[in-house]
Amino acid sequence: MTRLRTILLLAGVLLTAAAIAGVAQPHLGRAAAAATPKTITVAGNGSVTVVPDRAGFDFTVDTRAATAKAALAQNATRAAAVAAAIKNTGIDAADIQTSQVSLSPQTNQAGTDIVGYAASTSVSVTSTIAKAGSLVDAAVAAGADGVSGPNLSLSDQDAQYRSALKLAVANAKAKAQTLADAGSLALGGVQTITEGAGQTPIVFAQKAAPSADGVAIEPGTQTIDATVTVTYAAS
């Protein structure tokens, strides 16, 4: 019985010693924590330069009359004539929109009496660059007394932006490879990609000048930019 008690006491001492050793030296009591993976994070930029193929205009018709009803009626007639002239240039009805109709009283210099009414209608139109000049000529000839534009744009802007994104990713990879080489690392696969905010196209338009065929609209060029942030594995 005494011998059994002695054996049990020795076993307890050994277990206690092992536990103390594990606390004093964690690497002996449990597996070492995994090493933090190496990564390289870079920003990439891409740009494409394109020629816009769409032009937007706002045409305004202003009329004045002694009564509100007369001012609106005259304005509606002239605005309809402008819209018809625009359609006759080959513009689709879906690209023609009445964007604003307004009516306001006109007073004498003292501001005490109403002497008449002013009505105004604005028509917004989008056309191809090729039709833009004839469109302006037709609208003015039909009675438009205000022209605003052109607002140049691309019919395939989304596709061009995607091209800029691809260039941005390629730019990011080139930067990451340079950093990896400088740090004596091997560049691994992509871990994450974050798209940056797309920038509004910047228009670099040439100066437009009238020609014998009417108003000349020069499209110039637009730059579409894209940015990405990419994280690569490294070893």
Image (tube, helix red, strand yellow):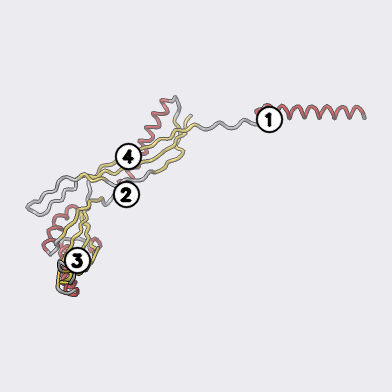
Residue 196: give its label: none
Q: CA distance from mark 1 to mark 3?
A: 86 Å
Can you name the residue that lies furthest to the left here? 212
Disc nearest the viewer among 4 and 3: 3
Q: Quadrant of residue 109?
A: bottom left
Q: Is residue 34 left or right of residue 100?
A: right
Q: CA distance from mark 3 to mark 2?
A: 35 Å
Which comes sooner in the sequence, label 1 or label 3? 1
Identify the residue shown where x is 37% and y is 32%. 175
Q: Which residue is mark 2?
A: 158
Q: CA distance from mark 4 to mark 3?
A: 44 Å
Q: Secondary structure at mark 3?
A: strand
Identify the residue shown where x is 38% and y is 28%. 178
Foreground residue, 107 or 226?
A: 107
Disc nearest the viewer among 3 and 2: 3
Disc 4 crowd, CA 10 A, few/some/many (<14, 14-19, 20+): many
Residue 46: give its label: 4
Q: Secondary structure at mark 2?
A: helix
Residue 120: give its label: 3
Q: Are marks 4 and 1 in contact (CB under 8 Å)?
A: no
Q: What type is the residue that disc 4 sits on?
A: Gly
Q: Which residue is mark 1?
A: 29
Which comes sooner in the sequence, label 3 or label 2? 3
Q: What type is the residue that disc 3 sits on?
A: Ser
Where residue 217 sits in the image (x, y, percent)? Answer: 15, 51
Q: What type is the residue that disc 1 sits on?
A: Gly
Q: What type is the residue that disc 2 sits on?
A: Asp
Which comes sooner in the sequence, label 4 or label 1? 1
